[in-house]
Image (tube, coloured by chain):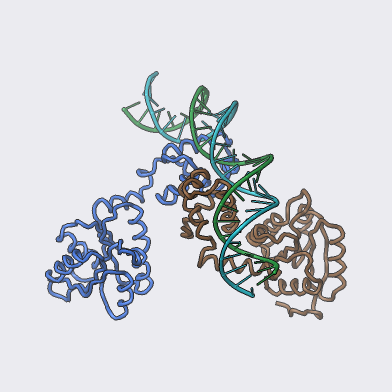
Chain colours: A brown, B blue, C green, D cyan
Amino acid sequence: MANPSDLSGKPLKLIIVEDDRQIQELLRILLNGTPGFYCQAVFSTATEFLAALPELQPEMVLMDIDLGDDLNGIEAVRQLRQLRPNIPAVMLTVHEDSEAVFAALCAGAVGYLIKGIAPTELLAALRDAANGGAPMSPRIARRVVETFHAGTQNPLSEREREVLRLLCAGDSYKSIADQLFISGHTVRSHIKNIYEKLHVHSRAEAVVKALKDRLI
Amino acid sequence: MANPSDLSGKPLKLIIVEDDRQIQELLRILLNGTPGFYCQAVFSTATEFLAALPELQPEMVLMDIDLGDDLNGIEAVRQLRQLRPNIPAVMLTVHEDSEAVFAALCAGAVGYLIKGIAPTELLAALRDAANGGAPMSPRIARRVVETFHAGTQNPLSEREREVLRLLCAGDSYKSIADQLFISGHTVRSHIKNIYEKLHVHSRAEAVVKALKDRLI
DNA sequence: GCCGGCATCCCCCATTTGTGGTAATTGTTC
DNA sequence: GAACAATTACCACAAATGGGGGATGCCGGC
């Protein structure tokens, strides 16, 4: 690909999708004021962005997750991925929770940056993404890496595995509570934590993951 | 491979892993007293067996499942498979439940015999395995075969299997309805029927049964 | 010492699920 | 044609579940 600090060649042509007008402007000024970058267009909604996509030939998209009551950024990335598989999307958002991170990466985002990132770092991250990298804010990167470790050793605590085992057996929260001599509230807490760690949202998904990954 | 009743050529060199001393002796005597077989070594634990494996060149392993508090036989077979992919392992155990059978076969066992098998049949089974066969006690064989004709064992209709598949994916009734282009009411009906046929009362139990019995 | 993970307990509330029914249509089998 | 399974659809209600909070004490690592 191009040189990381490509000041001589053609600038990186990118699109911003962001519903906050103020941030829109800041980003546009930052990009257009920096040699090597060119902000081709800014959209406040994913719908507008996707509609305009056919006429534009951006090289990259900088995408927010929360876009008002419009299509959210993750869904937008999913659709972008289907329409133009080789336009990389970098998320720039406030969401630091793993849920959003994994949803975004699964949807096809190549990078994940937290708003509040320093301008120079943002620019470096965009160059990184253009060069085939996967820029991520440090804490995000750590979290992502950890999920791979999770494959080798499961992230669940001893107690959580016990709960998961009973969850797989189809026991109700109440029944699990009775068997483990703890309150139903505690069972719920464990289950919430299990779901978060496994990145699932229901008992069925947890059961499937438990069986497939031999977590219990 | 060699002739099934290979009395003239080199005997079949095998190792026994079995924690019951009495059975150990019976097997050793049986094998060493029969032309065409040679019991190279006997181990009481999988750990000892795996440790000694590098120095031995057995042609086959006869493996028990329950090995005290040591590594169990299924795990031992899994590891044997990784170390020496072409040494076939035959399970000789009391476990007749499908759980153990499938776990063993998935781990890489080529045969599965039930303790109590007649000596002549055991010898025949070992010859069978040496010749590339897959010796199994009759009832085990039946069980294995049944998993292939999904129709007999699993009483679910085509539509019900589709619903079950989505149920395993964790989809909500509503989502299932949308994907199958039917109403949520119909999904509920199907699920009620599925639960009745599988003798379960919850999604989790259904998922487990579906995965374990390969219903989908 | 402070922070993070773990285990425990509690609250509220919307949604989902499980179960009890009924019933029409279609296709197959006896 | 009767009997039956499969598929579709609907109603109502109680129970279970999932997600959002928050709180405590304990322990181990930096």
- Residue A123 position, x and y percent, is 78, 73
Whether residue B177 appears in this view of the structure is: no
* Image quarter (top left, top right, bottom left or bottom right) of the N terminus of chain B: bottom left
Q: Does A42 sit left or right of A192 as displayed?
A: right
Whether residue A3 appears in this view of the structure is: yes
Residue at (36% x, 44% y) in the render: B153
Q: Does A201 sit left or right of A47 as displayed?
A: left
- Residue A156 position, x and y percent, is 53, 60
The vertical placement of A25 against B169, above or below, is: below
Q: Does C1 sit left or right of B6 as displayed?
A: right
- Residue B135 position, x and y percent, is 25, 60
The vertical placement of B175 against A35, above or below, is: above
Q: Nearer the viewer, residue C3 or B104?
A: C3
Q: Nearer the viewer, residue A77 or A160?
A: A160
The vertical placement of A96 against B147, above or below, is: below
- Residue B86 position, x and y percent, is 32, 72
Residue at (48% x, 50% y) in the render: A180
Could you say which quadrant of the image residue A128 lies in? bottom right
Q: Nearer the viewer, residue A47 or B20?
A: B20
